[in-house]
Each structure stands twice: as structure tokens, then as C-alpha cells.
Amino acid sequence: MALPADPENDAVCLRAAMVDALAQDGVLVDPAWRAAVQAVPRHRFVPGFYLATDDRDEHGLTLWEPVTAKLDYGRWLAAAYSDTTLITQFDGEEPDWKAPVVRRGGVPTSSSTLPSLVVRMWADADVAEGHTVLEIGTGTGYSTALACERLDSGDVTSVEVDPRRLDTAADALYGCDYTPTLAVADGLYGYWPEARFDRVVAACSFRNVPPALLAQTRPGGKVLLTLSGWLYGYARVLLTVAEDGTADGALLPGTVSFMAARTHAAPAFGNPTHWAAGLPDKPRKARYGPERLMAATDEAFHLLFLAQCAVPDAQLVTVGDVVHLVDVVSGSAATLTPGDGVWDVREGGPVRLWERVENVMDAFDSAGRPGPEAFTLHVRDGRQHLRHPDFPALLLPGSTLR
């Protein structure tokens, strides 16, 4: 007869193996963070999650398979201690993990972020003993637990916009004897009752730096954010807040993406062919094609973020061979169609979307293709400017304070 499953004991070796692997990869340089990862039982925070299959349905949508201890104990526990992001929710709909079903497509809206990135975020924010911390986006609570283990529960505040997600995270945290301050709140506005904080770290992305987060940070304190937008370009920035409430900081190297804060998510734009129908019939030849932004390279990842700053309200979608840019704010649109070795561009509306993107590419090349760490973000007087000595200043989308 098979012995009953015992995740508390079975997880010990798996957790130790994960810690060793992260240490070998250079993630756990700080012994205190290594001890935190060794102590926190990640499986307690992921009673169920989805893993993508290699199959698609008749509409081409990815099939996501639910994984729980009841469905497949070994697979569930092994995945919990892998350096993998585990999707726990789609489209804001809370799954019934007692009777889960295969998911067809959908937009992930909550997850347990891969442990290496969680530790990297806390370490990049220079979190240390004695700091009070605000975490934006509790999610499953695993990241919160690591902060409580590294610091003290009384110094950790975590907010989550989804009350059902927070209920589940709270149960897991309290079950592990962690007692941070938890609140249902929109991270865009931080959490004034516990302010001011020494560190603010966001586990979601924003189109610009929320003013409330700077106002809730002590002078000399730091705010670590992932910036994103409707083109799905990303950059991370570590800001230091000054006495007068202004903030400055460099973009950080690497390629990291987070789910957008729900209030900063892209709006629906309808049928792209409807937008294309109103464009001029005569195209021009593009100076650059869209593949330069869409390539699977670190440079393309960074360049897409810079381009997004130039066309902050544009969205991009590919239908067949045609690439569409749609701007629901100004009513502008552009299409790029592959030709004989060059792309044909049609643009209409008050903003020449692809021309603006091409101008960014010109400036990027002229500046010597600088990496993210060569750019600094300056937040003051209601403006958020991204600057580089050899690059035109770019304004983050929607950054003017009102």
C-alpha cells in the first residue's frame, strides 16, 4: 500500500535543491535571502495552478491544464519548487481548485512569480533589516512571505486589488505564522494608513510612476517599479525619493515583465481592419520594419519600451502578414505590409505612429544603441522624463499630474 502524501516532509529536499540551484545561478548571494527561500514553503501558497500544454483548441487558443495535489501530487509538488512562474488566475476569474477544468486561452491576471525574480526584486530594492516595506500586488503571498522571513512581519505591508486573491494569500500567510499588514487596495494609490515606507516594491507594472507611491516613501527611500505600456514594452527603474518629493533613478538591466496593474491595462480597440479601412490608399516605404521591435533579443525588448514612450497610446496586433498600430486616444492608425524586401506603411490620423517609432530607432542608432542602464528617469513638477545624454527626452505616458 502506498504511503499517504506528506508535502511538508516531501518538500524539504525539493526546496533544498531549488535553493542550491538558485545559489549556483548567482541569485542567492545574500545569505539572509538564501535562508528566507530555504524557510518558506512555497507549496502552501500554490494549492492549484495552470501549466500550458503543447495543444491548442479549434480556435488556436492555448490549452492550460490545472495542476493540484489531488490531480497529480508529484507534478504539483515538483512544479512548486521549480524556478517557474505558476499561473493561478485568468481574466480575474477565481478557479474552483476542488473541481478545476482545462482553461482555453485567456489573459493571466495572477500568478506566483518565479522565485529567482522575486528574490531579485527584493534584492534590487536594497531591502535590509529595519526597513518598512510596501509591496504592491500580494498575489499568492509567496513574495510577501519571503519579505516577512527576511525582515519582520510587522515591517511588511502588502496590498492586493482582488479580494479573493487576498483571502487566499492571507490564509496561507497566517497558516505559516506570518502576520504582515494586508489590505484590499489599488496599488496605484499605495496605502496611506501605514506610510511612510523605506521601500516600495511593485509586483505588477505601471504605465508611469504613481505619485502616491513617491508621497508615501520616506526621503532617501527607494521605489522599485516595472514600467510598461500598451505595446507591452517593459523597463524596470529604481528611484530614490528626495526631501521635496521628486525622484530620480536609472533603468535596470535585464528583461523582466509583470502583469499590468488592472487600472493601467490596455483598452479594447475593436477590429483592426476597421481602422485600416480609413487609411490612405498610397503607402510609403518604411525606414525600419516591425521585426526590429519584435525580435527575441534584449535589444528589441529595450527598444520596444523606448518606442512605446513615443507612441504611448498605441497598440500593436498582427493579422496575417499585416502589422496594425491602433491609437484609441487620438484616433490614429498605421499598417505595415511586407513588400519586396521592405515594408509598406500607411498612416492616418493626427499622429503619424510609425514615423514616430522610426524617429526613435534613428535616435537609438545615432546614440550607439545604449542599453537600459544608460537611461535615467526624472520625476518632478508633474512630469516624468526618460533621459540619455545623446537621446531626445521621452515622456512617460500619462505622467502629467492633475
Image (spheres, rainbow, N blue to C red):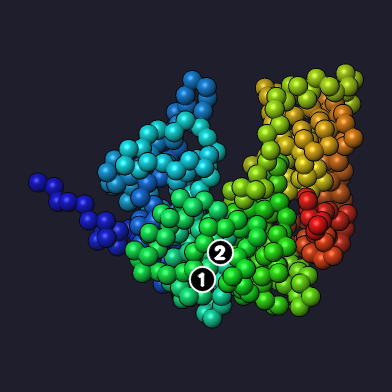
Residue 301: image location, x then y, percent? 68, 47
Where is residue 30 drawn, in percent x and y? 50, 73
Q: In terms of depth relative to the viewer, which is nearer, 325 or 297? A: 325
Crowding at dot 2, Cα within 10 Å, few <14 / some 14-19 / many 20+, comes out as many
Q: Which residue is tagged 1? A: 156
User: At which x and y percent is residue 261?
Assistant: 62, 50
Against 220, residue 55 (above or below) is: above
Instruction: Find numbered disc 2 in the image and state the secondary structure of the residue it sits on.
Output: strand
- Position of 327 with respect to 16 (left or right) is right
* Residue with the mark numbered 2: 135
SS class, disc 1: strand
Tell me if label 1 and label 2 are in contact, CB under 8 Å.
yes
- Outermost residue on the left side: it is 1
Residue drawn at x 76%, y 68% is: 248
Task: Give the residue displayed 82% in from the left and 50% down from the top.
Answer: 364
Residue 342 percent coordinates (x, y)? 81, 27
Q: Quadrant of the C terminus?
A: bottom right
Specify the quadrant of the image occupied by residue 201. Answer: bottom right
Q: Residue at x 78, y 36 (%)?
A: 327
Q: Residues within 10 Å of mark 1 (few under 14, many from 20)?
A: many
| Residue drawn at 35 percent across, 57 percent down | 44
Quadrant hosting residue 265: top right
Q: Is residue 50 left or right of residue 353?
A: left
Q: Is residue 139 left or right of residue 292?
A: left
Check disc 1 and give the amino acid type.
Answer: Val
Label 2 sits on what residue type?
Glu
Above or below, 285 against 239 in this view is above
Residue 211's place in the image compared with 291, above or below, is: below
Can residue 251 be seen at all in this image of the molecule? Answer: no
* Whether residue 305 is visible: yes
Q: CA distance from mark 1 to mark 2?
A: 8 Å
Which of disc 2 and disc 1 is earlier in sequence?
2
